[in-house]
Each structure stands twice: as structure tokens, then as C-alpha cells.
Amino acid sequence: MGKEIPLFHSDQLARVVAHQEVIFGAGETLTIRHDSICARSFMPGVIFGVRKDREGYGLVHGLEHLLLGGRV
């Protein structure tokens, strides 16, 4: 063995705005992949963030605090 496995990997793909891939495993793998081909797919999240900002949340560490309605 003795070979280190990188934890993060990044590629720039043509016609892909965002690509995320998470690979778990040793001996076998489970891969979860998400590709966005249009920036429009991010708009619901942007609108959600702007609305929360207007509510006066300020700086938030962790999206779960906004999604679950709690404050930091």
C-alpha cells in the first residue's frame, strides 16, 4: 500500500457550471454525483439566501441553521 489517496479532486468540464462528486469506500465504493449545466439551477438558493439576509440573520456558519429556522 503506502499510497496516499487524495481527499479532494477538481476538474473543469466543458458545458458544466458545477460538478460535485463524493466517493466513499475502501475495497468498494459508493459515489454520489451532482452536475449543474445551467447557473439558473442556483437561483432558488440565491433567493432563499437573500430573503434570510433581509430577516437580519447576519453572518451564518452552516447552512443547516438557515434551513432549520434557528439562529447561530
Image (cartoon, rainbow, N blue to C red):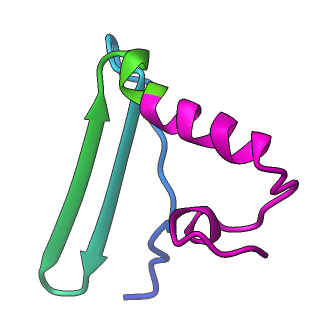
Q: Is residue 56 magenta?
A: yes
Placement of the N terminus among the 4 image quadrants: bottom left
Q: Across the whole image, how many numbered discs are drawn on residues? A: 0
Q: Which residue is nearer to you in this view: 1 or 68?
A: 68
Placement of the C terminus among the 4 image quadrants: bottom right
Q: Is residue 34 magenta?
A: no
Q: Which residue is nearer to you in this view: 63 or 36?
A: 63
Query: Residue at point 44% right, 32% down?
Result: 44
Residue 13 occupies which quadrant of the picture? top left
Residue 24 in the image, given as x and y percentages of width and height? 28, 76
Please state if 31 lies on the left or on the right of 67 as rendered: left
Residue 31 in the image, given as x and y percentages of width and height? 19, 63
Please state if 41 lies on the left or on the right of 68 as rendered: left
Please state if 2 lies on the left or on the right of 72 as rendered: left
Query: Residue at point 86% right, 57% down?
Result: 59
Residue 5 in the image, given as x and y percentages of width and height? 44, 72
Q: Which residue is nearer to you in this view: 51 or 7?
A: 51
Residue 43 in the image, given as x and y percentages of width and height? 46, 25
Magenta span of residues: 44-72
Q: Is residue 28 above or below residue 6?
A: below
Q: Is residue 34 above or below residue 8?
A: above
Q: Is residue 53 above or below residue 21?
A: above
Residue at the extreme top of the image, as rendered: 15
Query: Residue at point 12% right, 81% down?
Result: 28
Residue at the extreme front of the image, as rendered: 55
